[in-house]
């Protein structure tokens, strides 16, 4: 029987976006170097798997396929609202991160799970859908669009979780942003994910009450472990 992959879980708290990005790059490089060494030396050392949880100060990030026009602010206005902006190396368009939003960055070697990036995205969505169900929020996929939605495929469709990933030698980085209780007004400064006719929502807005981001993180970790079938190593 194949052993379940072991994933090291780290809670980074509220962390500057660039600092978290640099950490992801460092962990990805270590994992990729391990795989290159295995092939060169005919060894079988398994790269370490990581799951990073955090929140960020106000920041907008634009993916490789995104358009700068989807950021509706100039540098002066970014400073006025105390927000940063980064052009980054994930897929997808523009999104917002900020306090009250739970961000999860999986640094996973998909060769220890399955080598299918589309399946990977669907599994991330599934873990979020299950997490929201725990809080009595019915969510689903929206055909043709990545992420998790409320009232998908209806005129009232609204996005509650955005996703954008990068994969190098089957090692993943970047990940998901689940709106627990952020200030949704910050989404008004962008065309979220480049989609002009869809709203953005949060767990707090859907439930009409505050939600503990710590509790949401615990449930999401549990569902990630169940969907991906990995064991948890707390750090």
Image: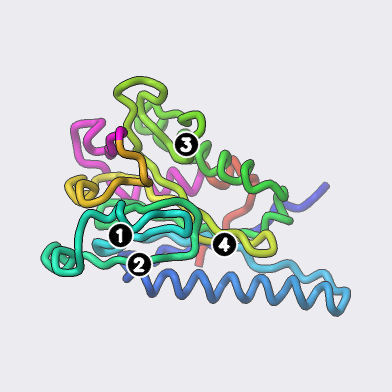
Give the CA distance from mark 2 to mark 4.
Answer: 20 Å
Which numbered disc covers residue 107?
4
Residue beneath the point at 42% across and 48% down: 218
Residue beneath the point at 21% across and 51% down: 189
The residue at which mark 3 appears reads as 145
Give the CA distance from mark 2 to mark 3.
Answer: 23 Å
Residue beneath the point at 45% across and 48% down: 163
Give the CA distance from mark 1 to mark 4.
Answer: 21 Å
Which numbered disc covers residue 15?
none
Furthest toward the right, the residue is: 42
Q: Are marks 1 and 2 in contact (CB under 8 Å)?
A: yes
Q: Which type of secondary structure does the marked residue at label 3 adopt? A: strand
Q: Are marks 3 and 4 in contact (CB under 8 Å)?
A: no
Q: Earlier in the sequence, mark 2 or mark 3?
A: 2
- Asked whether 83 falls inside the magenta stretch, the response is no
Q: Earlier in the sequence, mark 1 or mark 2?
A: 1
Q: Earlier in the sequence, mark 2 or mark 4?
A: 2
The image quadrant that residue 42 belongs to is bottom right
The residue at which mark 1 appears reads as 60
Q: Which residues are magenta?
A: 197-222
The residue at which mark 2 appears reads as 86
Give the CA distance from mark 3 to mark 4.
Answer: 23 Å
Above/below status of 13 relative to 136: below
Could you say which is closer to the camera, residue 18 or residue 92? 92
Q: Which type of secondary structure does the marked residue at label 4 adopt? A: strand
Q: Are marks 1 and 3 in contact (CB under 8 Å)?
A: no
Q: Mark 1 or mark 4: which is in front?
A: 1
Question: In x, y percent, where is residue 211?
Answer: 26, 42
Question: In x, y percent, where is residue 122?
Answer: 57, 39
């Amino acid at each position: 029987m194949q052993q379940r992959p072991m994933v090291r879980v780290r809670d980074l708290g509220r962390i500057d976006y660039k600092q978290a990005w640099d950490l992801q790059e460092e962990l990805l490089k270590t994992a990729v170097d391990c795989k290159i060494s295995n092939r060169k030396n005919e060894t079988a050392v398994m790269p370490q798997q990581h799951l990073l949880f955090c929140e960020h100060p106000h920041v907008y990030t634009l993916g490789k396929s995104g358009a700068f026009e989807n950021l509706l602010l100039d540098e002066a206005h970014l400073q006025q609202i105390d927000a940063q902006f980064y052009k980054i190396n994930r897929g997808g368009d523009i999104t917002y991160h900020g306090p009250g939003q739970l961000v999860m960055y999986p640094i996973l070697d998909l060769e220890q799970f399955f080598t299918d990036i589309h399946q990977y995205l669907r599994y991330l969505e599934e873990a979020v859908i299950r997490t929201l169900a725990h809080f009595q929020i019915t969510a689903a996929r929206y055909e043709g669009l990545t992420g998790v939605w409320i009232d998908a495929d209806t005129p009232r469709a609204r996005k509650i979780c955005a996703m954008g990933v990068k994969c190098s030698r089957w090692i993943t980085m970047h990940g998901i942003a689940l709106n627990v209780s952020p200030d949704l007004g910050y989404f008004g400064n962008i065309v979220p994910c480049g989609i002009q006719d869809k709203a953005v929502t949060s767990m707090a807005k859907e439930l009409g009450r505050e939600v503990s981001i710590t509790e949401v993180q615990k449930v999401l970790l549990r569902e990630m472990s169940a969907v991906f079938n990995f064991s948890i190593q707390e750090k």
